[in-house]
Image (tube, rainbow, N blue to C red):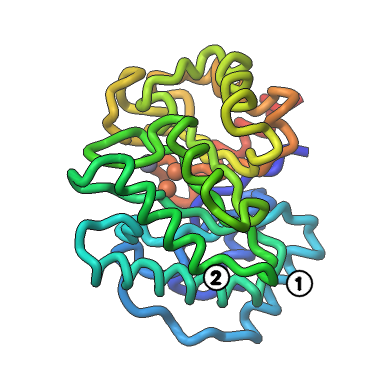
Amino acid sequence: MLNIGCHLSISKGYEYMGKEALKINANTFQFFTRNPRGGKIKELNKEDIDKLLKIMQENNFAKILAHAPYTMNLCSDKEDIREFAKNMMKEDLERMEYIPGNMYNFHPGSHVGQGVEKGIEYIVKALNEVLTEEQNTIVLLETMAGKGTEIGRSFEELKTIMDKVKLKDKLGICLDTCHINDAGYDVSNIDKVLEEFDKIIGLKYLKAIHLNDSMNERGSHKDRHQKIGEGTIGIKNIEKIINNPILKKLPFYLETPNDLDGYAKEIELLRKLYV
Ligand code: FE
Ligand code: FE
Ligand code: ZN
């Protein structure tokens, strides 16, 4: 079975997201751990979380994916911002232990002119301070489009970060199809992309896919997501991606510009195309 879901809002709680997922025939979903701009986190409601866990169990959900706020920058040039980001991730991961065995995704960060090397140094430092031997959550670095000074625009950059992290087995990669297209990878030849991924990072670290079409050409470094089949990647390539023997067992998360109804239609289409 295709493991697919979409991004859902956490504003009405955990159980609500589980119910929304069921409504659109999804068997997983992604959510922001808090307001995407950062900010205060809601009081943790364990009862609500337990209700979600029950829904997940009864309906055979694949792992769900928490997404860190995209403003969280572990490699800012300002110490207080780096500290803030690190504490945010620490708090998020502590919370993830109430939904153990799932995954947490974050954007490596933007070096804001300090250079990739310096940026990577800060990201590694933060991860080494935050990750614990005991945690039951795999932390995913997302492949980025390379907009501005974003780190993670190539498999090599992600590999460099991972190799310097002491608890490397707590890390994985979330491959975003729009982002790698915009970063310059030829998504129409997914076998070759995965071969390169394997050579540089290792396929065992590939844990999740953000399934998005792109509004822009390959290598544009833009990061504008498009609806499935309506962008430069196209439905034929997306069909190949979800049916790729290496990828087809992984969870897919849609981050396309849609309301719930639009997501339901994309999920229906993708389930039809899945063999
Ligand atoms: Fe993301
Ligand atoms: Fe993404
Ligand atoms: Zn994006």
Query: Which residue does the numbered mark 2 point to in the structure image?
Result: 93
Amino acid type, mark 2 = Leu
Mark 1 vs mark 2: in front: 2
Amino acid type, mark 1 = Lys
Determine which quarter of the picture holds residue 73.
Answer: bottom left
Q: Which of 27 and 181 is in front in this view?
A: 181
Residue 25 versus residue 192 in the image, above or below: below
Q: Is residue 23 visible?
A: no
Q: Which secondary structure, mark 1?
A: helix
Q: Nearer the viewer, residue 269 or 109?
A: 109
Q: Is residue 68 visible?
A: yes
**Quadrant field for ligand 3:** top left
Query: Which residue does the numbered mark 1 point to in the structure image?
Result: 54
Determine which quarter of the picture holds residue 231.
Answer: top left
- Pinpoint residue 13: horizontal percent, then vertical percent: 52, 75
User: Alpha-carbon distance for marks 1 and 2?
Assistant: 21 Å
Residue 262 versus residue 243 in the image, above or below: below
Q: Which of 12 and 156 is in front in this view?
A: 156
Q: Which secondary structure, mark 2?
A: helix
- Pinpoint residue 203: horizontal percent, then vertical percent: 67, 32
Q: Which of marks 1 and 2 is nearer the N terminus?
A: 1
Q: Nearer the viewer, residue 97 or 81?
A: 81
Q: Which numbered tag is attached to residue 98?
A: none
- Pinpoint residue 199: horizontal percent, then vertical percent: 62, 23
Asked if disc 2 is less than 8 Å from ligand 1, the answer is no
Residue at x 52% of width, y 37% of height? 159
Residue at x 35% of width, y 41% of height? 151
Whether label 1 touches label 2, CB < 8 Å = no
Residue at x 70% of width, y 24% of height? 243
Residue at x 25% of width, y 57% of height? 76
10 Å crowding of disc 2: few (<14), some (14-19), many (20+): many
